[in-house]
Image: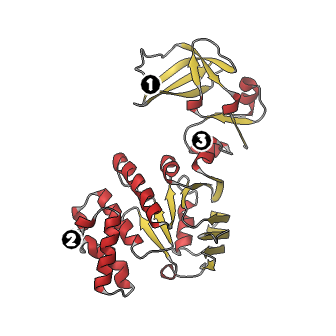
């Protein structure tokens, strides 16, 4: 097998008595779009900073393509970082911003200008080279930051929540562009985000972080369809979680289980399989779908997601219904 782009072994970072990163082992493949997903304080950004060299580990090692870079300075690692605030030089033109890294490396002016223009073309901003960053939109500035980071052809590109400051529509557009850029360049992208939908959209693999450790590692489909713990089931998407008592009483099963809202259906009469009686307590229209909250007769609330393939006839609040599910859609969790 090819040497991993990044190999972390026993990586630990403590701040006083707090373990921000707790004995982490992780391999990230060459050319992989890898996302580190988790809530604030889960350790994902600290891991990114340890890879970049902005922080030194308390213990453990960081390898870049088989080369131990644990104690090297950031400028002595073949990685580059794109930050949420873009960090563009306001007094320079867009072209000068992109060419800056080449200039620092001593590349001749003609060559660095050509390479900077090619990098701008890769993010579809070739006609914006003479403008200043203040004359660009947020999405355009983000693409300039990407061009500046990739023009020096790093082996690994680190992205620290780079889309967090953009509005929803622009963020969705940039997600598509980021994936296209990563595929065209063929370099390893390591992406930090707290947005689970963003991670599912972009990634080849995702590491879900919690309390300085990886709670689960896998493809987007593996993470979403097969969460291993209540934390992953609840943090990545929306899940209906049945604790051990609820699983026994409602599902006639041992252990803790989850089921996604889109796997459930509602009917006016009991269906085949597991059919739980209850009352509709809330109906939330979401445009492409409707979220229906049903309070079961025992008091548990379930979320059901229905696609709006046809206009809804009426508001169903207070209606008596059955929530139907198949045991094959239930996921067993390790609590």
Residue 32, x across and y down, in percent: 55, 62
Q: Find disc 1 in the rendering and name its residue.
A: 309
Q: Quadrant for residue 134, please give it.
A: bottom left
Q: Secondary structure at mark 1?
A: loop
Residue 126, x across and y down, in percent: 27, 66
| Residue 122: mark | none
Q: CA distance from mark 1 to mark 2?
A: 48 Å
Q: Is residue 243 left or right of residue 103?
A: right
Q: Secondary structure at mark 2?
A: loop
Q: Find disc 2 in the rendering and name its residue.
A: 130
Q: Is residue 292 above or below residue 68?
A: above
Residue plotted at (53% across, 69% down): 49
Residue 316, x across and y down, in percent: 47, 16
Q: Is residue 107 left or right of residue 244?
A: left
Q: Residues within 10 Å of mark 2 (few under 14, many from 20)?
A: few
Is label 1 or label 3 in front? 1
Q: CA distance from mark 3 to mark 2?
A: 47 Å
């Amino acid at each position: 097998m090819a040497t991993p782009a990044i190999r972390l072994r026993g990586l630990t970072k403590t701040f006083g008595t707090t373990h921000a990163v707790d004995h982490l082992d992780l391999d990230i493949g060459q050319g992989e779009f890898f996302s580190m997903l988790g809530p604030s304080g889960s350790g994902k950004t600290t891991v990114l900073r340890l890879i970049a060299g902005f922080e030194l580990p308390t213990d453990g090692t960081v390898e870049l393509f088989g080369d131990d870079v644990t104690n090297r300075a950031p400028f002595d690692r073949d990685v580059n970082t794109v930050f949420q605030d873009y960090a563009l030089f306001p007094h320079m033109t867009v072209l000068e911003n992109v060419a800056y890294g080449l200039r620092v490396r001593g590349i001749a002016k003609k060559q660095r200008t050509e390479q900077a223009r090619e990098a701008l073309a890769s993010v579809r901003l070739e006609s914006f080279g003479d403008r200043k960053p203040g004359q660009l939109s947020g999405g355009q500035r983000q693409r300039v930051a990407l061009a500046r980071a990739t023009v020096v052809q790093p082996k690994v590109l680190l992205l620290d929540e780079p889309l967090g400051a953009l509005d929803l529509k622009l963020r969705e557009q940039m997600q598509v562009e980021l994936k296209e850029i990563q595929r065209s360049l063929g370099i390893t992208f390591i992406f930090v985000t707290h947005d689970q939908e963003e991670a599912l959209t972009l990634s080849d693999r995702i590491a879900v972080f919690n309390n300085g450790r990886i709670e689960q590692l896998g493809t987007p489909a593996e993470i979403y369809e097969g969460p291993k713990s209540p934390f992953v089931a609840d943090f990545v998407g929306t899940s209906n979680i049945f604790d051990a008592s609820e699983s026994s009483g409602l599902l006639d099963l041992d252990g803790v289980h989850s089921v996604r809202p889109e796997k459930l259906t509602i009917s006016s009469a009991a269906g085949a399989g597991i059919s739980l009686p209850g009352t509709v307590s809330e109906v939330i229209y979401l445009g492409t779908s409707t979220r229906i909250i049903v309070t079961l007769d025992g008091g548990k609330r379930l979320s059901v997601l229905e696609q709006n393939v046809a206009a809804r006839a009426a508001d169903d609040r207070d209606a008596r219904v059955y929530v139907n599910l198949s045991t094959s859609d239930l996921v067993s969790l390790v609590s």
